[in-house]
Image (cartoon, helix red, strand yellow):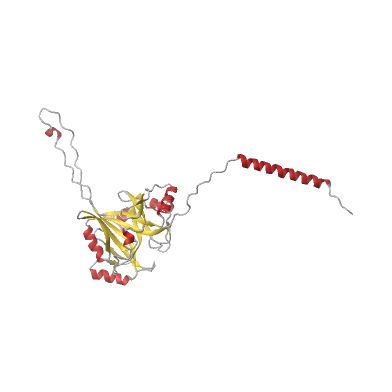
Amino acid sequence: MTQTKPKFEHATIKRIAYIALAVGMTTCAVAQTTPPATPTAVAPTQTPPMNGIAHIALRVQSIADSLAFYNKLGYQQAFAWTRGDVTTQSFLKLNDTQYIELYPVGPAAPPRTPAPDAAQAAAPGTAPAAAPTPARPPTPSTSAFMHLCFEGADLHALHDFYVAEGLTPSPVNTAAAGNLLFTMRGPQQATSPQNIEYTQYMPGSKHTLDFGQHLSADRVADKMIAVTLAVQDPAAARDYYLTKLGFTPDSKYKGWRNFLVLPGNSGEMVEIVPVASLGTKSKILMTSPDIRKTGELLKAKGVAFTDGDTITVTDPDGNIIEIIPQAGTFHGPSM
């Protein structure tokens, strides 16, 4: 027997068809009248990686004396800038990608001589001269830590990330040695804000042309793994490095020192301490592939050192070099 479908099914199907047609027409109308959405720029969510610490810069009393001292530690000058017979900047090589830059202290400004008493200085029959200018003490001419420079893997990407974070780095330029460079103000140090430098080694630069050269087999250590920064507000500086620059707390040396690790896979670090603990001097931590040889080399060269948690050497300007064994082992008490 042939069955007939109930009439309500036909009515329902018709209503569904009408609704679908209406929705389709409405969607089409909306699509035709609504302008396309403007793409939203998405800020980077992760700090672009850094290759490591590129250099520290020190202002020293005598570049010649400093070079003589660091030569005893096995380090050689790769190149230098001069003005006439005067060296204005020396590039002391630790390894192919790390340096200590040495700058001479500036000459002290002569003191300002007090003017004579106004009444005595005035010529007879004339009005007294202006009030005397107070004497000015000489401008200090002291050695000091100048800046720390990080090596970026992609300097333009790193620069743009900082801009997106609301920071104000200088434009990326090519420095005199031929590498890309930009700078940025950081936390307040002993007398001024930290000058943070960023570089990217470029083909044909002074540094890349020196790869494999000026590397003595008798270097007391061959890698700089940490730089200590003395600041006026350590808590604020630490927060700045963590939240703005993308550093992370170190776990490798936890319990010994409070290091912060650079973005990327270098494992290199900064340490933030109060100004009172270091003043205007620098302190770096280096590793040696043979710590016993390090001690022997220092003794043979007549370089004074202390041997405790680290082998510690102090340069002629009071800057501190600490040395530990390579690969995370520790020389001294267990951490």
Query: What percent of the width, then of the height, locates residue 291?
Result: 32, 70
Res. 284 in view: no
Residue 215 figure quarter: bottom left
- Residue displayed at 26% across by 68% down: 298
Determine the residue positioned at 42% across, 48% down: 163
Which of the 4 image quadrants contains residue 12? top right
The N terminus lies in quadrant: bottom right
Q: Residue at x 24, y 63 (%)?
A: 69
Name the residue at the top extreme. 125
Q: For the C terminus, give its image quadrant.
A: bottom left
Residue that extends furthest to the front in the rendered view of this protein: 204
* Front in this rendered view, residue 90 or 270: 90
Whether residue 300 is visible:
yes
Q: Is residue 271 above or below residue 36?
A: below
Relative horizontal placement of residue 7, taking residue 102 as reference (left or right)? right
Q: Please, which residue is most extreme toward the left here? A: 124
Q: How many marks?
A: 0
Compared across the picture, whether 103 is left or right of 23 comes to left
Q: Quadrant of residue 66?
A: bottom left
> Which residue occupies the foreground of this view, 223 or 27?
27
x and y, in percent, of residue 109 in the image: 20, 47
Along the horizontal axis of the image, is 155 left or right of 12?
Answer: left
Which residue occupies the extreme right position in the image? 1
Q: Position of residue 81 (x, y in %)?
A: 25, 55
Provide residue 132's location: percent of width, then percent of height: 18, 36
